[in-house]
Amino acid sequence: MARGFDALPPGPVGGAVSGGSDSYALLLLAAAWAETAGRRLTVATVDHNLRPESRAEADAVAAFAAAKNLSHRTLTWEEPPAGNLQDAARRARYRLLGDWARDGGLGAVLLGHTLDDQAETVLQRLVRGSGVDGLSAMAPLHRREGVLWARPLLCLRRADLRAMLSRMAVTWQEDPSNDDTRFQRVQLRHAGENLDAIGLTAERLAATADRMALARDALEHLAAETAARAVTADALGYLRIDTGTLRLAPLETQLRLLAAGLIWVTGVAYRPRLSTLKPALAAALSPGFRATTLHGAILADDKGALLVTREPGRTMGPVRAGALWDQRWTTPPRPGAHLRAMTKRELAEAGWKASGHPYLACRSVPGLFENQALLAAPFANPLKGCHFMLARPPEAFFNSLTTR
């Protein structure tokens, strides 16, 4: 296990511990490593607030951590869940743990995913019809929203970890949702018992994920090389793609670049479906193309190049200055001021024509207002202290093309 832990960068390390067997095993192994390596380990538990027992379970983890002389913090999900419950809970978990890690200056956050989880993820993505990226499943190390996430247990089976805990007389908590067959992951877990009999074991599924990860790395490398030649990411939050260079690239590379661009300009966390991405790309590269919308963005011709920018009609309403507008823009706090989309008249007042930016791109950025008076815009900042900050700067687009 030390090989996995020693790959972590310097600094304190966090451990995400739910109270289940995998996370307790992670805590024990990580604590032993941290003591030997002279590293500081701190622990957090996410209370999803979905069951009456959840707070007591988090308290039990806190007591277990205290017995190991480790600091612990419970992170509570306050918002009511909407849509797909498991997906919403997963996103909330990453957000809460990510905020905790950044606030604490942690070099990495350890997750307790095992080889069994890896196999279930591969099966789940096979069912969805995922491509190379999906089937490469979970990486031992990956960066997300400025945080390094590490999975040092991916090479181990859950049964072996539970056997270790039993030998150490450690009891763990069982989440009833892990046996709820309404969830697809639970269905696949039960199906895996039958797949073992025909040779499709967890080890072979994990090996497939490893080989797919090698293929993904090669595809990402090609996409990054193509982006360096074809894509200009502007600090106003839009892309210009040279269509001549894009047409010379393989279709997979074209789709990968466009998907990454859509995520960057909109702030949406997930890729568009392939069934919508392919026809939009084909239209954008067709003669006579003018404009289309996809994934909250506009694709438009811009003097022979492909412009990818936020769809103005999909931006959010007003927010106070200092808050994040449309998941993309913010300014320093300013009492009594707010950010909102600008009207055509206000865009002209701000001087968009002199900015040199495309009109569509200017329409998708906010203005800073006091009452109804326009104070500043990202392309025109006449007042001191009114500078705008793009949540995902241009380099974030290029960094997003690789997972490492």
Image (cartoon, rainbow, N blue to C red):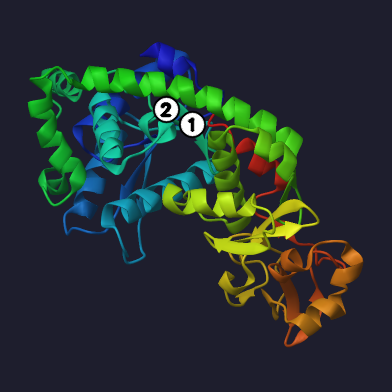
Work out whether 162 lies above or below 389. Answer: above
Image quadrant where one finds the N terminus: top left
**Amino acid at circle 2:** Ala
Q: At 85% across and 75% down in the image, what residue appears?
A: 350
Marks 2 and 1: in contact by CB < 8 Å?
A: yes
Pick whichever, 245 or 182, lies toward us.
Answer: 245
Question: For mark 2, does the 10 Å Cα neighbourhood hold few (<14), some (14 to 19), or many (20 or more) residues?
Answer: some
Q: At 64% across and 52% down in the image, what residue appears?
A: 286
Question: In the image, is 51 to the left or to the right of 283?
Answer: left
Residue for badge 1: 142
Pick whichever, 132 or 292, lies toward us.
Answer: 292
Residue 379, position as x, y percentages in the image: 83, 64
Pick whichever, 15 or 382, lies toward us.
Answer: 382
Question: For mark 1, does the 10 Å Cα neighbourhood hold few (<14), some (14 to 19), or many (20 or more) residues?
Answer: some
Residue 324 appears in which quarter of the rendering?
bottom right
Residue for badge 2: 139
Q: Name the residue at the front extreme.
A: 287
